[in-house]
Image: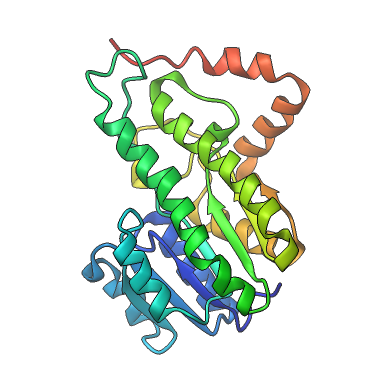
Amino acid sequence: MQIENAVVLVTGANGGIGAEFVTALHQAGAARIYACARKLESLSRLVAADPERIVPLSLDITDQLSIQAAVSQCQDVNLLINNAGVLLNYQGCIAVPNLDDARTEMEINYFGTLAMCRAFASILKANGGGAIINILSILARVPIPMTGSYSASKAAELSMTQTVRAELAAQGTQVIAVMPGTVDTDMAKDYPPPKVSPAEVAKASLQAVIDGIEEVYPGEQATQMAAQIVDNLKAVEKQFAQMLPST
């Protein structure tokens, strides 16, 4: 699949990675880009770059009515980019006082992404198959205890992505899992380097669509971790296990 002349919907378009997706898609010649966020005003800067091709859309991926409204408006989509996500809990799974943040992470990262895949699967089929990009994390493969519930939500999202890939293969829909390491966004502002730029994540993800690659590990950190996981998963697990929540 080519990006030029594609019609694309990007969730979480007001965030660091989402905004870079919109910019990269615009530069690559996408015919129309539905830039989605819960608050339309947060998209004004992106839309100003090209109001004819960049269409702002209010969307809450945890609200089925909001998703259905997007489906009604975006019948021409052939590339769905599920970028919306949240990391709320830095206190692990046991030390955290309650499970409210863990439930929200699962609701957005897993159930919200799944709901979008389900809602747009038939649209992609009608438009020739197309592709889905799910923005995950290397933590989908190996968790960090400090962000245990987030890691769990991303692991669930990876498993779901693999399942959706199998289910939609017959209709010709590519389903791509993107698993960067630490991305240089506000979400990771307190994390030490190395960090991969949001622009590099967007570029690698779109290139995967063109090349037909199912799993992408943008940046040196994620690439090295992915190789280590293949060589010795338990060693990487033990290494990450040192990153415990502060007491």
Residue 155 at x, y percent in the picture: 54, 34
**14 w.r.t. 34: above or below:** above
- Quadrant where the N terminus is found in the figure: bottom right
Residue 171 at x, y percent in the picture: 71, 67
Q: Is 37 or 167 nearer to us in this picture? A: 167
Question: Which residue is at a point 48% across and 80% down the rendered structure image?
Answer: 75
Left or right, 154 with respect to 133, comes to: left
The number of discs equals 0
- Quadrant where the C terminus is found in the figure: top left
**77 w.r.t. 16: above or below:** below
Q: How is the image coloured?
A: rainbow
Residue 83 at x, y percent in the picture: 46, 55
Question: Which residue is at a point 62% across and 37% down the rendered structure image?
Answer: 222
Left or right, 55 with respect to 20, comes to: left
Question: Which residue is at a point 67% across and 71% down the rendered structure image?
Answer: 129
Residue 87 at x, y percent in the picture: 35, 38
Instruction: Give residue 209's quadrant in the image.
Output: bottom right
Residue 6 appears in the picture as rendered = yes
Question: Which residue is at a point 55% across and 74% down the rendered structure image?
Answer: 123
Left or right, 27 with respect to 115, comes to: right
Left or right, 41 with respect to 146, comes to: left
